[in-house]
């Protein structure tokens, strides 16, 4: 099973992905996480990506396509994978189609989580992420049991640099211009399922599971 989670920054893709990869035993491929890991490790990839990410711009298509292509070829992806944050442009989506065709693997479904802009800003500016395991929280909407401590691993929570209000505004503009066309792209391929993301985390999860279960 190969699934894409599509939606604006703050829609809840990472939050749903945590639950989905567990339930369906999928390999989790989040390009944002991979890029942040590269920055942390000081690799050449990280140096290439850093400026774009700090400014809320997209990293060049060839860079992210290369990352995802390599990852999908690893043997653990045989059992299925969940893509979060990729593709983000029509160029990336076309490249993914080619990568999958070469591997003779179908794309099973694109789950689009739709959330209004005011809510997205509130979600992103209150987001906290675990430094150790990447689990996602929100100061108000999804707080950890102990302030600034990850429920799952005890790691320290931090605020992403690009979750400041100024960068969030830019990222939402980038989404509208560069990523939103993918909704039509996948609708035309008859792969799109849209979920109302302005609901409780558990309600959204139940609805995504119903879509995936109906596919099997
Ligand atoms: P969010 O979860 O808020 O949507 P991500 O963690 O997915 O954010 O992405 C953070 C940043 O990483 C993006 O703003 C962009 O700079 C970069 N990035 C992640 N995925 C891609 C991609 N597929 N194409 C280009 N840039 C990407
Ligand atoms: P994305 O990966 O799409 O950028 P996240 O999963 O990181 O989004 O969620 C963004 C923020 O919103 C996080 O702080 C998360 O805890 C919170 N959040 C996620 N889903 C919901 C929801 N359904 N209702 C309220 N807050 C949510
Ligand atoms: Zn953790």
Image (cartoon, rainbow, N blue to C red):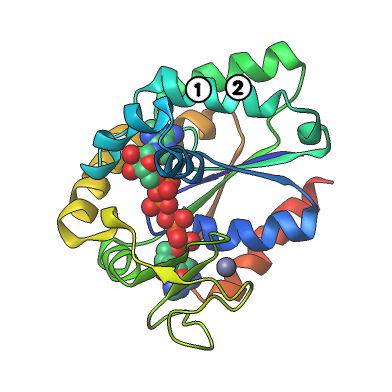
Residue located 32% across and 72% down the image: 126
Is residue 28 visible in the rendered image? The answer is yes
Check mark 1 vs ligand 1: CB closer than 8 Å? yes or no: no
Report ligand 2 position as a quadrant.
Answer: bottom left
Tag 2 residue: 69
Near mark 1 (Cα within 10 A), the count class, few <14, some 14-19 or many ≥20, is many
Residue located 57% across and 28% down the image: 68
Tag 1 residue: 65
Residue located 34% across and 65% down the image: 159
Does residue 8 appear to the left or right of 26 in the view shown? left
Near mark 2 (Cα within 10 A), the count class, few <14, some 14-19 or many ≥20, is some
Image: 175 above or below 67: below
Does residue 121 appear to the left or right of 87 in the view shown? left
Task: Give x and y (percent) for residue 163.
Answer: 28, 59
Q: Nearer the viewer, residue 74 or 113?
A: 74
Task: Give x and y (percent) for residue 199.
Answer: 49, 73
Task: Give x and y (percent) for residue 162.
Answer: 27, 53
SS under mark 2:
helix
Outermost bottom residue? 146
Task: Give x and y (percent) for residue 36.
Answer: 43, 44
Q: Nearer the viewer, residue 10 or 119?
A: 10
Does residue 53 appear to the left or right of 4 in the view shown? left
Residue 39, located in which quarter of the rendered image? top left
Check contact, mark 2 vs mark 1: CB within 8 A.
yes
SS under mark 1:
helix
As measured in the structure, the alpha-carbon distance from the residue carrying label 2 to the one carrying label 1 is 6 Å
Image: 210 above or below 127: above
């Amino acid at each position: 099973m190969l699934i894409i989670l599509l939606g604006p920054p703050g829609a809840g893709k990472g939050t749903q992905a945590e639950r989905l990869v567990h339930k369906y035993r999928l390999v989790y491929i989040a390009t944002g996480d991979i890029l942040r890991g590269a920055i942390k490790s000081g690799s050449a990839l990280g140096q290439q990506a850093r400026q774009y990410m700090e400014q809320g711009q997209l990293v060049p298509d060839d860079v992210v396509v290369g990352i995802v292509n390599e990852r999908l070829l690893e043997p653990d992806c045989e059992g299925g994978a969940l893509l979060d944050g990729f593709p983000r442009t029509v160029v990336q989506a076309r490249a993914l189609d080619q990568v999958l065709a070469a591997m003779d693997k179908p794309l099973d479904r694109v789950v689009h989580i739709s959330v209004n802009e005011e809510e997205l800003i509130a979600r992103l500016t209150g987001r906290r992420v675990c430094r150790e395991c990447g689990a996602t929280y929100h100061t108000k909407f999804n707080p950890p049991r102990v302030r600034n401590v990850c429920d799952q691993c005890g790691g320290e929570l931090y605020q992403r640099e690009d979750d400041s209000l100024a960068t969030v505004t830019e990222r939402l503009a980038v989404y509208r211009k560069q990523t939103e066309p993918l909704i039509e792209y996948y609708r035309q391929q008859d792969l799109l399922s849209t979920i109302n993301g302005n609901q409780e985390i558990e309600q959204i999860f139940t609805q995504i599971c119903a879509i995936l279960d109906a596919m099997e």
